[in-house]
Image (cartoon, rainbow, N blue to C red):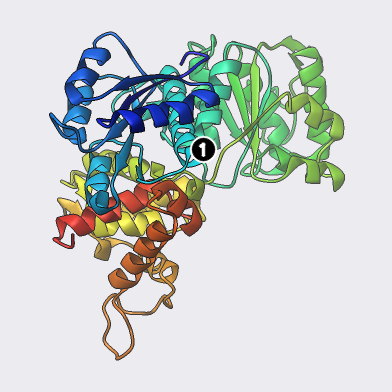
Amino acid sequence: MSPRPSVLVVEDIPTLAETFRAFLEPAGMTVTVALSGGEARARLETLLPDVLVLDLHLPDMTGIDLMRWVRERGLPCETVIITARGSVQAAVDSMREGAFDFIVKPFSADRLRITVKNALERKRLAGTLAALQEVNGDGAFAGMVGRSAAMEPVYRILQNVAPSTATVFIRGESGTGKELCADALHRLSGRADGPFIAINCAAIPRDLLESEVFGHVKGAFTGASADRKGAALSAHGGTLFLDEVCEMDLGLQAKMLRFLQTRTVQRVGEDKARPCDVRIVCASNRDPEAEVRAGRLREDLFYRLNVVALALPPLRDRDDDVLLIARHVLASVSAEEGRLFADFTPEAERALLAYGWPGNVRELQNVIRSVVVLNTGPQVTAGMLPPEVLAAELVGAGLPSGSPPRALAEGIRPLDDVIRGTIEAAVVACGGNIPRAASALGVAPSTIYRRLQGWRDEGGG
């Protein structure tokens, strides 16, 4: 994107078009005006705007027709729809065609500026992700799956730090994919052809951890019947991943600090120090600063390990990545188990999105695996999901988790009616601004767009 973003305003009333130009230019944008769909097409042959501000009703075509023309040519611009108050449903339809947002006439200069700036930010994030991701059509980046804005800083840090030898400390709740992130860092680095060795410091008995990391010689202790290379030497020329590093015994922490300082390994029972060229990546689901304050993690070791800090977001903060990951896991597990599952029903998707996933990606993987093993396809229905996942949408609608999905007692409204009324009231209260309504409701904008489209497909208008 250029330092001064460009906007093409397509509005058939000249005075309004010039008004919109006057609204946007003081915000540092270069604005071009087209008074018809045909004129807009002609300008788009030579001009590539960052944002298209488009009136739905043009004299020679509809705004949606022009959007489709833009999409067919693969022009990378975001679209903001302008509509009259009586055409809000048409504007919602435009979301299906890929519009970023819509605004309803009349609107203020600030309303237009904020919406266009949000569209510019969305384009910037999309451009960054496109540059970073190894796009395979499934949102994968070096083995990680996700396209949400919450993952963009993760991908950016991985891309920037991978070529270096800096030690990386990955933080995140259990199940967020810290080992997968470490593996992605390895695959993006110049050490990708070398080994990737992972050690879980919490899963190995403390009296064996030193031997597992640094190795031992035959006879070093009872049971040492042969030489052992150890994880550090096994990772020579590659990456050593220390998961749950805060669980490491204080005595081993001292030896780890010496290893980081000298880059040599002395196996248990051996006097000789061996050079070891590894890149260290570590992770913890605990707060390392709190562990330092509690005396369970050496401060000098923490500073050696925390050269680059990388925080993985929990799954509940990753918007529609839940569905992206679920589909990825469904395809993989279905193939592995010889099942025919291909997708989720809309009701199942809504339940997956509403649930908080305290166990993060690992919990989602386990749920999908259980569904595939216990059921037959081709679609995953809501009834196949565990009760706790189904209960989340009921609670989110203000009903107790044991409530039925349809009213069976006087005074109880059907769940879909409650959800629909809440969403529609929020959209009206926010002046038709879907992202603002989504923020107020604490959900992703795509959740509202999906529901609006679903109600329309059901014939609800």
Q: Position of residue 163 (x, y in %)?
A: 58, 11
- How many numbered tags mark residues here? 1
Q: Is residue 32 left or right of residue 56?
A: right
Residue 230 appears anywhere in the view: no
The image shows residue 218 at horizontal and vertical percentages of 68, 24
- Kindly tell me whether residue 276 is visible in this rendering: yes
Q: Which corner quadrant of the image does residue 332 belong to?
A: top left
Disc 1 marks a residue whose amino acid type is Ala
Which residue is found at the position 20% from the left and 38% from the top? 57
Q: For the point 39% across and 69% down, which residue is it? A: 391
Image: 228 above or below 236: below
Q: Which residue is located at x 28 percent, y 76 percent? A: 414
Q: Residues within 10 Å of mark 1 (few under 14, many from 20)?
A: some
Residue identifier under label 1: 150
- Helix, strand or loop at mark 1: helix
Q: Quadrant of the C terminus?
A: bottom left
In front here: 160 or 107? 107
Residue shown at the point (68%, 21%) measured from the top left: 167
Q: Nearer the viewer, residue 263 or 442?
A: 442
Of the pair 428 and 122, the residue shown nearer to us: 428
x, y percentage for residue 134? 38, 20
Residue 158 drawn at (x, y percent): 55, 22
Foreground residue, 309 or 433? Answer: 433
